Amino acid sequence: MRAKSLIAALSLCGLVAACGDTTGERLIYGAGAGAAGSALLNGNLVTGAAVGAAANLIYCQENPRRC
């Protein structure tokens, strides 16, 4: 059950995260999306924010033309 929740949260983060133009914006947008996903899944908000921020930052660094 925990793995399903984590997968759902990561998927939600990927769907709702906006990239942002600067590193700060990318961190804030990702953290917001991660926290929102965690809130919807009754998870840890801090963990969700950290995962969302990292995921958005890494995604935008790996795919700069899509951000």
Image (cartoon, grey):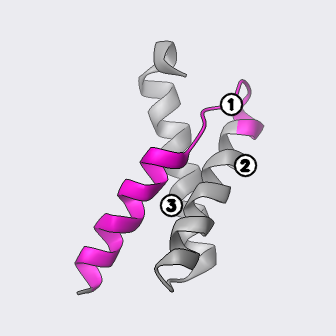
Disc 1 vs disc 2: Cβ atoms closer than 8 Å? yes
The amino acid marked with disc number 1 is Gly
Tell me, for residue 20, which label it has, or none: 1
Q: Residues within 10 Å of mark 1 (few under 14, many from 20)?
A: some
Q: Is residue 56 above or below residue 32?
A: above
Q: Is residue 60 magenta?
A: no
Q: Element under label 1?
A: loop
Q: x%, y% of residue 61?
A: 50, 27
Which residue position is annotated with label 2?
28
Which residue position is annotated with label 3?
51
Q: Element under label 3?
A: helix
Please tell me which residue is depicted at 60% across the width and 66% down the height of the picture.
36
Please tell me which residue is depicted at 61% across the width and 77% down the height of the picture.
45
Q: x%, y% of residue 12?
A: 43, 57
Q: Is residue 60 above or below residue 18?
A: above
Tell me where the magenta segment starts and ends, as one range: 2-25
CA distance separating discs 3 and 2: 12 Å
On-image quarter of the N terminus: bottom left
Q: Which quadrant would residue 2 be assigned to in this image?
A: bottom left
Q: Is residue 18 magenta?
A: yes
The amino acid marked with disc number 2 is Ile
Please tell me which residue is depicted at 64% across the width and 57% down the height of the picture.
31
Please tell me which residue is depicted at 56% across the width and 61% down the height of the picture.
34
What secondary structure predominates along the stretch shown in magenta? helix
Most foreground residue, 33 or 62:
33
